[in-house]
Image: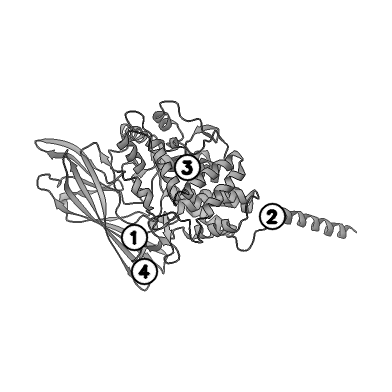
Amino acid sequence: MRILGVVVLSIIVLSLLVSVVPQVEATAPSLTKIKNAVKKGYNYILSLKRELGIGTVYSEYPALPIVVHDPDFKVGSSYVDVWFIPGYRYDAFWMAEARDGSISTVIGPNYKTSTYTFYIDLKYLRIDTAITVATLKVKEIRTYHEDTDTYDSEARIEIVYLDNNYDLQDAYLYVGGIYVGKLGEASEFVVNIPKTLPSMRTSIRHVDMLAPLVLYALTRDYSLIYPTASLDDSILNKVWNGNPPSTQVYLGYKYFHIYDIYMPILADQLFMTNIQEPNGDHFWDAKWFGSSTGYGIVNELFRQNGYIESNYPAYPYKSKIVGAAEAAHQDGGPLFLLTLQQVNRGSGDPLYHAWKGLYYAYKGEYYLARSCWYQIVSYWDGDGIYVSGQEGYSTVRLATAIALGSILAGRGYISWDTVDQMVDVLLQLQWKGVGHYTNDGKTIYTIVKPDHAGGFLVSYGPIGSYGYVPFRPGLIEDILRYAGSPPEYGGPIPTNAETTLLALSALIEYAYWRYDVTPPELLD
């Protein structure tokens, strides 16, 4: 009888265990795949982390940060201290701008070598014209060895043009903050590239607002995220003149002001208060404050702290929305949101519907959230979510759709079928180190980019399974014809921090609602 009792008890326990373990269809991506993707994406984000005096920032993407510094640059009869920083316009007089060149790939029996040739123009800006003082020709060479699963990377930099009126022979050349030499010392400089060199630019809106939320959700480790630029409130307080928006999130031991349109994506993982409906103020770097934009205020904060004039600068990214605000002397956010509502023949950009849907879900208005979901799904074609005029699919739009769909399916408002299909595509968009790229939709390159491994493609198309295809939605580009930051880097940029943070957020929500797995368990 005792043995029988044990058997009966075992059967009861097993039945209870079976009842609490989610029964997921075989067509759904496995939890193992989700965990592997999250771990790689998490490490990618950490590789972009940079410590500054103001706190941690996360760079936009891996790059090749090249800086030229001439402390005695002669202009007329005067000598001035000049920093040429690609992607950043210094004052109104100096700038450096990267421009594309060419891509070539050699595929051998056990290796693949990609060479990216691009140019960096060093410019002196006058009232009526911009003088290209010098041009750096950069050859970035990356090799993947298949037999050992290892990479070699180096850069070759040469000065190919020098205006005789502006001598840069004694200017200092830095790569990733490391001194390489004076421009006049050699015809070519060869530099070995570390595994990852974070870009000089960071996006305070979105990336530095979203990163601490994602990282804290995954780790519950406050020490990992503090100090972060967005967590000490200095930036939002400066922008909002000491009265930042009331939206807050509880991290570690107290509430912090975080103001971002993506916040509702993790509202069921972190305790948040006063999340606001998507509005123009969420694009606060493009808000006009009477004499400057929010971006201008942040930029000045960076300059005052000495982050820009350095061997390895950190500067805030300036978007086209900010450029629109500067040109019109009015808020750029409402213009951008209005633009999103006009695409797809007036039915609205799926990203806008995802923002609205995530907000409605946060408010508990699930039927309104479901209506937004159906708007999104009407543009899902099995590969991605279509936006009129696009050249490639947007991963940000896919990720936000997955997050919304996971919340709704987990609560029983929709089925899992389409969400599962979307997640299956998203997992294929994580960069492995080598992949495919096209810039014109015709020529497809195999490219070696080990520093991007673990990140998620910014945009994609069905080339070589899925490869990097620039997004470029026509209507949005047409309306936002304003100058943002010039290019910092001239090679292909298949992944970035914002896209990867949103992909991680989507996978966090999917695992939570599909498999009943909390975010920290994904890193087990």
Query: Which element carries disc 3, helix, strand or loop?
Result: helix
Packing grade of label 2 (10 A; few <14, some 14-19, many >=20) is few
* Gap between marks 2 and 4 measured at Cα: 45 Å
| Residue at (33, 45) in percent of width and height | 200
Residue 509 in percent (x, y) is at 57, 49
Q: Earlier in the sequence, mark 2 or mark 1?
A: 2
Mark 1 vs mark 4: give the one in front: 1
- Quarter of the picture containing the N terminus is bottom right
Residue 254 in percent (x, y) is at 54, 31
Among the 4 quarters of the image, the one containing residue 495: bottom left
Query: Which element carries disc 4, helix, strand or loop?
Result: strand
* Gap between marks 3 and 1 measured at Cα: 29 Å
Residue that numbered label 1 is attached to: 439
Packing grade of label 4 (10 A; few <14, some 14-19, many >=20) is some
Residue that numbered label 2 is attached to: 21
Q: What kind of residue is marked 2?
A: Val
Q: What kind of residue is marked 3?
A: Leu
| Residue at (34, 57) in percent of width and height | 492
Q: Is residue 249 above or below residue 105?
A: above
Residue that numbered label 3 is attached to: 210
Packing grade of label 1 (10 A; few <14, some 14-19, many >=20) is some
Q: Earlier in the sequence, mark 2 or mark 3?
A: 2
* Gap between marks 4 and 3 measured at Cα: 37 Å
Callout 3–callout 1 Cβ contact below 8 Å:
no
